[in-house]
């Protein structure tokens, strides 16, 4: 019988860069796939994982700001502890980091 975790080893370090929206919800240009988003809401699916705590992101209904602009939002499932909100104004998902040492050179 094998062990899942060896005693005495540290827990793996949380890496927020690995947590984001799932690929099927974002097209190649970084725009939200509207049909997939609506389907996730209707079926109660998660759309990604939180960059702050790693919990699941729950999609919220989209908001039509103008006839050409639609805003999207996904909230962390852990509302009491984390409270992270992933906002995508105009349907544009910015997956990069704002930390200077993590930006592309």
Image (cartoon, rainbow, N blue to C red):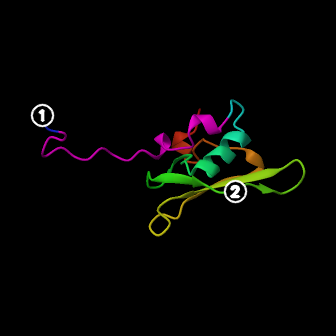
Q: Is the N terminus in the top left, top right, bottom left or bottom right quadrant?
A: top left
* Disc 2: which residue: 61
* Disc 1: which residue: 2
x, y percent for residue 67: 90, 51
Q: Is the C terminus in the top left, top right, bottom left or bottom right quadrant?
A: top right
Does 6 lie within the magenta span? yes
25 or 41, nearer to the observer: 41
Q: Quadrant of residue 34?
A: top right
Look at the magenta stretch and give its main secondary structure.
Answer: loop
Classify 10 Å Cα crowding around label 1: few (below 14), some (14-19), many (20 and above).
few
Which residue lies at the image location 47% right of the left edge and 40% below the top edge? Answer: 18
Say which element carries label 1: loop
x, y percent for residue 5: 18, 41
Is 7 on the left-hand or right-hand side of 29?
left
Which residue lies at the image location 12% right of the left edge and 45% below the top edge? Answer: 7
Residue furthest to the front in view is 43
Which residue lies at the image location 69% right of the left edge and 37% below the top edge? Answer: 30
Q: Quadrant of residue 93?
A: top right
Is 28 on the left-hand or right-hand side of 9?
right
Say which element carries label 2: loop
Does 91 lie within the magenta span? no
Do labels 1 and 2 touch, CB within 8 Å? no
The CA distance from mark 1 to mark 2 is 45 Å
x, y percent for residue 40: 61, 46
Is 105 on the left-hand or right-hand side of 28?
left
x, y percent for residue 27: 68, 33
Residue furthest to the right in view is 67
Nearer-N-terminus badge (1/2): 1
84 or 101, nearer to the observer: 84
Q: How many labels sit on residues?
A: 2
The boundaries of the magenta stretch are 4-26
């Amino acid at each position: 019988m094998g062990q899942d975790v060896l005693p005495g080893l540290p827990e793996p370090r949380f890496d927020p860069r690995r947590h984001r929206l799932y690929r099927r919800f974002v097209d190649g240009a970084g725009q939200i796939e509207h049909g997939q988003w609506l389907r996730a809401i209707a079926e109660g699916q998660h759309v990604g994982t939180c960059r702050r705590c790693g919990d699941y992101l729950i999609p919220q209904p989209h908001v039509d700001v103008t006839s050409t602009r639609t805003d999207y939002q996904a909230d962390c499932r852990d509302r009491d502890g984390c409270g992270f909100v992933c906002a995508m104004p105009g349907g544009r998902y910015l997956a990069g980091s704002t930390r200077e040492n993590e930006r592309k050179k």
